């Protein structure tokens, strides 16, 4: 029984680690979504800017306005490249945290199973001892009746 208490304490520690891993994973998901949304918004801005640029090319527009639009698109491209890198880092962190969470779940399940097996073994031992005691009592009753 003392072993089960020790295992329960270890299980509590593992469950705490699992909760921490869940929090870290959720935070990494939230961060990833935030960065990915920023990337999506930049891509939409670039798409609008390119449509505007195409419109300028098909009508008479001052060359300065076209240069300005090309410069804006280039700035957006640079921001997109940076955000793509950030999104990849966030995805990698999210994957790492997911793996840690999975490992934490496995560890908790292992200890739950070990504790469950120990409880079953204890119950079986108790039942065996009770049966042995019942047999002993039955034998004593039988012999006490025989002697009379």
Image: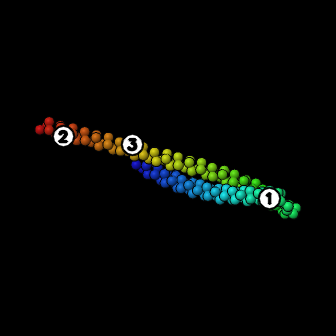
Where residue 62 sits in the image (x, y, percent)? 87, 63
| Disc 2 secondary structure class | helix
Question: Which residue is at 21% across, 38% downward?
Answer: 139
Residue sitting at x 42%, y 43%: 117
Q: Residues within 10 Å of mark 2 (few under 14, many from 20)?
A: few
Q: Which residue is mark 3?
A: 121
Q: Residue at x 52, y 52 (%)?
A: 14
Percent x, y of residue 103: 56, 47
Q: Secondary structure at mark 1?
A: helix
Measure how far apart labels 2 and 3 are at the Cα level.
30 Å
**Which percent across, then down, holds residue 28?**
62, 56
The one of 113 and 124 positioned closer to us in this rendering? 113
Q: Which mark is residue 137?
A: none
Q: CA distance from mark 3 to mark 1?
A: 79 Å
Q: Nearer the viewer, mark 2 or mark 3?
A: 3
Q: Evaluate whether residue 78 shows in this view.
A: no
Is 16 above or below relative to 127?
below
Q: Quadrant of the C terminus?
A: top left
Write down the residue under mark 1. Answer: 55
Q: Tell me, for residue 141, which label it has, or none.
A: 2
Label 2 vs 3, first from the N-terminus:
3
Q: CA distance from mark 2 to mark 1?
A: 107 Å
Q: Going from the N terminus, do you reach mark 2 or mark 1 first?
A: 1
């Amino acid at each position: 029984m003392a072993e089960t208490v020790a295992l329960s304490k270890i299980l509590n520690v593992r469950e705490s680690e699992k909760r921490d891993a869940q929090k870290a994973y959720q935070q990494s998901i939230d961060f990833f979504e935030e960065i990915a949304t920023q990337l999506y918004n930049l891509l939409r801005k670039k798409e609008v800017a390119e449509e505007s640029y195409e419109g300028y090319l098909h009508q008479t527009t001052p060359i300065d306005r076209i240069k300005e639009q090309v410069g804006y698109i280039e700035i957006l491209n640079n921001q997109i490249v940076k955000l793509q890198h950030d999104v990849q880092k966030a995805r990698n962190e999210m994957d790492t945290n997911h793996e840690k969470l999975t490992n934490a779940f496995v560890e908790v399940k292992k200890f739950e199973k070990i504790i469950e097996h120990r409880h079953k073994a204890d119950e079986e031992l108790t039942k065996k001892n009770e049966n042995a005691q019942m047999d002993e009592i039955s034998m004593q009753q039988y012999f006490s009746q025989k002697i009379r």
